[in-house]
Image: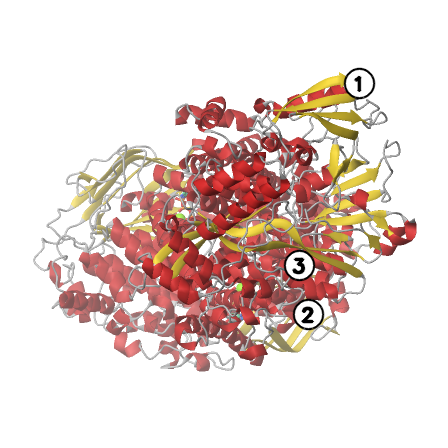
Amino acid sequence: ATLSGCVGTGTAATRATDSSVVIGLSAAVNTLDPMNTTSVGSDLSVLSSVYSSLVTRRPDLTIGPDAATSWDRVEPDRWRFRLNEKAAFADGTPLDADVVVWNVERLTDQDNGLRMTSNFASLLRAEKVDDHTVDLVTDGPDADLLGALSFLYLLSPDWTEDHDPATATMGSGPYEITDYAAGGNVELRARDDYWGTAPDIDRVTYRITPSEAARVSGLLSGELDVVAGLDPQDLERLRTDRALEVQQSDTTRMAFIKLNTLKGPMKDVRVRRAVNYAVDKESIATSLLGGTVAPSPGQLLTSDYAGYSDDTSGYPYDPEKAEELLAEAGYGSGNPLRVELTVPSGQYVAGDLIAQAVTQQLSEVGVRARINSVPFTVYMQKYLVDQDMSDMQYITQAWPTLAAGGLYNLFVSDSPYAYWKDAEFTDAVTRARTETDQDERDALYADAAERARAQAPVLFLFPQPGIAASSDGLDWQARPDDWVRPAEMSWKGND
Amino acid sequence: MASATPTAPDPGGPPLLEVAGLHVAFDGTPAVRDATWSVRAGEIVGLVGESGSGKSATGLAVLGLHGPAAEVTGSVRLSGQELVGADEAALRAIRGRRVAMVFQDALDALNPYRRVGDQIAEAYRLHHPDAGRAEARERAVEMLARTGIDRPEERAREYPHQFSGGMRQRVMIALALVNEPELIIADEPTTALDATVQAQVLERLVELQREMGLAVVLITHDFGVVERVCHRVVVMYRGRVVEQGTAAAVLAGGRHPYTRALVASVPSTDDEPGSRLPTVPEVVRGLLGEVDGETLADPSLRVPDGAVGLPAAARETTGPGRTGAGRGTPTPADESAGPGDGAATAAVTGGVDRADAAGATGAAAGDGAPAGDGVSAPGGSGDRAGDGPATAAVTAEGGRADAAGATGAGAQGSALADAGDGGAVAASTPAPLLSITDLHVSYPGRFGRRTTAVRGVSFGIAPGETFGLVGESGSGKSTVSRVVAGLYRPDSGQVLFRGEDIGGAGRRGRRKPVTGIQMVFQDPYASLNPDRTIGDTIGAGLRFHPTFASLSRGKRRERVAALLTEVGLDPDLADAYPGRLSGGMRQRVGIARALAPEPELLIADEPVSALDVSVQAQVLNLLADLQRDRGLAMLFISHDLTVVRHMATRVAVMRAGEIVEIGDRDQIMERPADDYTRALLEASHSVRRTAA
Amino acid sequence: MLRFVLRRLGLTLVAVWGALSAVFLVLHSSGNPAVMMAPVGASEEQIAALGRALGYDRPLAEQYVTFFGDALRGQFPDSLTFQQPALTVVTDRLPATLTLAATALVLACVVAAAVGLWSGAGVLRGRRPGAAREWPMGLVFLAQSVPGFFIGVLLVWIFGVRLQWLPTSGASGAGALVLPAITLACGVVPPLARVFRNSLTGELARPYTRTGLALGMRRGRVLRHAAHGSMLPTVTVLGLEAGALLGGTVIVENVFSWPGVGQLVITALQNEDYPLVLADLTFLITAFVVVNLVVDLLYGVLDPRVRHSNGGH
Amino acid sequence: MKTDTSTRRRRFNAGTAGAVVLGIIVLLTLLAPVLAPHDPLAQDLAHTNAAPGEHGYLLGTDQLGRDLLSRLLYGAQTPLLVGVLAVLCGGVFGTALGLLSGYARGWADQLLSRLADIQLALPAILLALLILTFGGQSTAVLVLVIALTGWPAYFRLVRSRVLALRTSAYVEASRLQGAPAHWIILRDLLPGVRGLIAVTATLDLSRAVLMEAGLSYLGLGAQAPAADWGLMVAEGQGRLLSSWWIAVLPGLCLVALVISANLLGEHLSRRKDTGGEPRRALSRISRTRTRSAA
Ligand SMILES: Nc1ncnc2c1ncn2[C@@H]1O[C@H](COP(=O)(O)OP(=O)(O)OP(=O)(O)O)[C@@H](O)[C@H]1O
Ligand SMILES: Nc1ncnc2c1ncn2[C@@H]1O[C@H](COP(=O)(O)OP(=O)(O)OP(=O)(O)O)[C@@H](O)[C@H]1O
Ligand SMILES: [Mg+2]
Ligand SMILES: [Mg+2]
């Protein structure tokens, strides 16, 4: 079936006239169940066009309506949503309060083992108020619930009874899937009977193109209209092409090397600081990332987060200082520091290269770092399940709601993600999360940021660069949060 | 045989095919040089010569089938039309239509993947483009019927591998004749066949030749076939036609010395059994003095006047006084046989076979055995000096004392018991050297079944006796020899060697061969390890021998050198690899290897059938000499009755795994009791040596 | 003939059994599969429960038996990455792989036949093997010395990146098939062309060729008969190569992001998606062995000698 | 006459050329520490993706600014080491088993033959992937995996040759002379398969190198930051568009190595009169080449 479709061939010009678009994805769509995946770049980009959620995050990162037309917080732990009365699934089933209740039940039931469940830790249940009104109840005040809800895609309870949502779709979103085979390209068609605003683009092809070179050459040859998550080293080449529009921004994702402060050499804060001094972030950013990003000022957040502190400063590149600190910690030429640096292979933009560059620079101050490149799942298994992170691990982290508390929560003492037990930091973050006063909260977050900088639970690097390119004729605003949604695109001459 | 005798055509008719000044060279090496001969319509011409003399090359060049590597010059005219240099299309029109070929091995020459009928039909349609499929099929079936295939309709639908060798050759003939050509070139059409089958196929070919008025060029190296079938004969040597004429004239008294020598060296029924065969170099030397091969290839060379009787004379001129004194029926011819002439003959090497010309030189072995030890009943070589007296084996049937060569270990004279076809067991006094009773041997077949190769064979061999085993291919001769040698385990039956059961029937595991029995193998090329020196190959027999194992390196080398000398080879060859040895030399090495552990019984399984006629005589002579000198007992296996008759004193005839007849040589040859033996005898027509 | 078929069938089963046992052993020697199968974030108890549910707590021998039972019935646990029955994931990808493999095979056959016939015609005309005129064999030799992934990379570079003639990845449209099929075929042509060429020249050297010429056949006809004769070894190799093609897809599909079974196996291995690895390997191995069985049986059709001999040769 | 000698000389030259190139590669690899202008691991982040000749880098640099020439010089170490060791292991193992199996026959022979069949039923690359993924990656495992997928070639060839030789007249003659089994195996059979093994090993070397490269390409062989040709192709693949040399140069080196081994093997197989058997058996038996070339 994958081979039959010839959509996606032809030029951008012909696609503009028949209103279709070809999007290059770097990873295959693995499942069609929107609640059983957290891959924004692939699975969810496709499925968010097929399913609708209560609210959605707009390109400017604010929350806007989707199936819910309005909402308010009726109690600190109770949110009320009014549903669009026209909202309905493709088979005509209305999208009403019962549907929401059923979906929340499905999500919160741990036995279903859905991957999205962990993003809704605070959500308790949904309660039907009337056919088009529904209340969501949390276990306490949760400022981030709305952001999370933009991930709650709604399935039809009736349809789910006799279909496997992992392999088939029937949603209430603007598009429907016309062609899909596991691992292969995906084709979408705009629904005629969509209850919301009809999208401009009628037909969408997601072409799975894992090879960076193939994505770039696809763009250059006009085979692909849109690609996000490009390698900065290709920027120059892409920019010289007149038929392409290149967009470059920082993402909301911060890249750093996590240090295992619970055991091994990284327990010693001097060593942690030493490795921070030893790495020349600037030159790595300039060479490997094409100067698209600036080194982080010693923070775990990017500037998009609410709670970002303007006051911290990063570790300067100072190998002598690093050697000094290492010597203090008892490492030297006679007793070199040996560490392992784990990288999930091919997972992050330039991740493998950055790891190699870091290793090389560490070796210049006498740290012998061995790179362990493993598949992402294996990496996550060790990191989260086995709680057996190696001394160092390359990672990028973001919190979808862009709240400092969300991301910082990954570093508090009892977080399985943290590998860092620091009372001061944890205390600041915990207090900030329940603090209602904006200034007070920012102050607490600034304390936390300063503490994190000083204690260096990570080797601070830089934000992950976001580079997207699209056909010149296509109107599309690249987003800092990885989403690629055809509903946000249109061909310039077409409207 | 008379039925097959060809009728000579009109001698005055114009030649159908004229070959004149034909030259064929492969990569610059000439294979045929200046050959001139012709065939008239309805005539059968035999093209004879030893291997490599250019017979096939000539035949192929006629139709331009010599292949791209060859350069052909000269002239070949078919009814006046020049064929050398003719274009493909012209040749194609002639091939198969006017001139057809029959090749030697029909299993290969027929397309193995296609039905026999289809192949013949296709051949027909190639030259009858208007003929329909049905017509061609009919034609094919008809041709199969004419060549003597039963149920031709059915068999036309079979594949070549479903036919027996003789049948295949008939199919091949049908294929050649389907377009009714004027001339057939048959390249050794029967060489691979058993004597009896060979006779049938030839007979059919001659019949068809007569019916269809064909001309035939019959390429062969078998003078028996020539005498039986051909009107005229062309003899080739080293690419040259050295002689041509009517078959009778050439066989009776060729004018070229090579022809003479060739005819003389073939064992004949007229020969006295066990006599020394004149070898080609000997004969030539006798006629001309020393000549090299190139001189001998000169077609203008003629047997000098007055040398007419020389082949026989050659037999008497050799060797210092060795006589077959042990024989019960001495004849003049027996007073031949000679070691000691090696040095004298070494010069006659030329193209024949370098060291083969060196006769046996056992006397020079340096072990102190007197040169004349053959005069009396020989006591073996010096190693054996002091071993018991000469003994005689007495065959029960013949009742005639055959003085056999001496054996070692004080063996007693024995009257040998034969369990012949009738199962009659004659009384015997002392034990024979080897005695086999009721031997059954089978080979593993498919699906766990076993095919029986030998069933109920019994015979015995007395010390010093040469026992001949004849039979058609697949009759089980080699199987018997392998069991005796200890290379294969029989299913049941007894193999007693020196009174000890060495057969090991019914026991498990590999049998350990007995060093007292050694073997000379058929294929001299396969039987020597190309990666080991000759000295090493021969010496291994000493290394593992219970008594010689203790010999020092030097002593072993000495013995190897002595053995090489004994078989007529240069002792320096010990350090050479077999790669550069000729077939005859290799066979001598094989014999030396067999002699090294001082066996009492030597098995010779078709020791000469892979060798050229001209070399065959030398090896047979060597074996006969050694057998006599060393007093060896020998199990001599051959499919050729003439050769067996020449070598053996007693003969068993095998067929399909059983012995159909066993007895004294003369009795078998002259008064065969069994039909099969008679058929065999009739088929193995040998040349009468009229020149004697 | 029946015996022949049964024997081959038996050998085939033995081969499948052995191969699957090897897979089983390797997988089980690397620790508790349940750990690998558990979703990310699963707790100790969840892993243990999963292990129990899948029977990994039972004795190895028992697991071995059930493993076979399940494998034969095509029952594998759900894939971890796809959360679907593993076999479904594999069969979903099958059309892509089969299209690619079939195209490559046809391409390879055509090229190999052309190369072989070129050499055969040359031999029939009197050219020596290895002569300059036999340049197609030189190309074959070259193709055999270039790693497949490098051929892929070069093709992408030249035709996709430089010339931009053809798409470099994905499986949409006939155009996308060209480069991967060529790359895959490059691995199969050398053995195929060599065997065909060698057995063709071998057949041409056999006496029946001379018989054909002596009967007045044209060279073309002789070549045809010889080609028929050389089918047997060629088909043997073709069978092995057809099976190997499936293995070859592992790298080619990876280079060209072709969404087939070969890419899947790498993904599955990388993700340590144990059920998927199992299903995928079982499928590939079975396909490989079955192709060879078919070839073995084809022997009988192609060579009358085998047909009549009632068994192997 | 002329054509004959010229053909012979050409073949001879091809074989010699193979040997010479192979020798040069080995030599360069051994001398890499002396010849390499830079440390193959040293990065020059200021000059990444330098084109050949730029900034004083003769063959340019890769994404991390490492000198490509130095990396190429060092890059054959792993393939050659792994290749030679794998060929040795597989060759010795396969030959020994083939000799014993062919000479002794019996149930052990049956068992080993079936084992080889089964080995063949498992496409080599899959087996390698499986073992390397679940059994861990190390040079030793790599060598073992490649040897494991290579031994059936030797085994089958040697065994079938021994089966033919064991009933040959000269082996029977040795038995008649009373030679013990080990003597026959060592003196009669082993020399008979020597040429076969030499040819097979040469061709197997190219197979092993290709397999090592293929596995490194897939990320299961040599690991970054090591300089290894197969790995370098994989690393440079994404940069083909702007910096083709990063992937193409190591690929060409790999091709040179494999071609030279193949040329030598072909040449030997013609000279040793092995009738093309090893080539056939290898292409039949070891799927690696096909797969990695596929
Ligand atoms: N195709 C060939 N290429 C090179 N040399 C050849 C070829 N065919 C024959 N010869 C050589 O030509 C010479 C004559 O060979 P030919 O086959 O004519 O001999 P023959 O008399 O038929 O021998 P035989 O009785 O063994 O068949 C031999 O020396 C042989 O080696
Ligand atoms: N190793 C073997 N395996 C199976 N069958 C065999 C084997 N050797 C011989 N045979 C069969 O045993 C029978 C007797 O063979 P044997 O070699 O003893 O015949 P032979 O008389 O020596 O024939 P030839 O004159 O052709 O040498 C034949 O039918 C043959 O096919
Ligand atoms: Mg001939
Ligand atoms: Mg025999």
Return the mark for residue C54: none
In terms of depth relative to the viewer, which is nearer, D105 or A411? A411
- Helix, strand, or loop for circle 1? loop
Percent coordinates x, y for residue D208 in the rendering? 46, 57
Between the residue at mark 1 and the residue at mark 2, the CA separation in whole angstroms equals: 111 Å
Quadrant for residue A89, please give it: top right
Q: Position of residue C265 (x, y in %)?
A: 57, 42
Q: Amino acid at mark 3?
A: Ala
Q: Is residue B116 visible?
A: yes
Whether B362 is drawn above or below A148: the answer is below
> As rendered, which of A239 and C88 lies closer to the eye?
A239
Quadrant location of the N terminus of chain C? top right
Q: Quadrant of residue B479?
A: top left
Chain for disc number 1: A
Q: The residue under label 1 is which amino acid type? A: Asp
Give the residue at mark 2: B17
Q: Do circles 1 and 2 both sit on a common chain?
A: no
Which residue is label 3 attached to? A213
Q: Is mark 2 within 8 Å of ligand 1?
A: no
Quadrant in the rendering for residue A238: bottom right
Q: Residue furthest left?
A: B386
Q: What's the CA distance linking mark 2 and mark 3? A: 75 Å
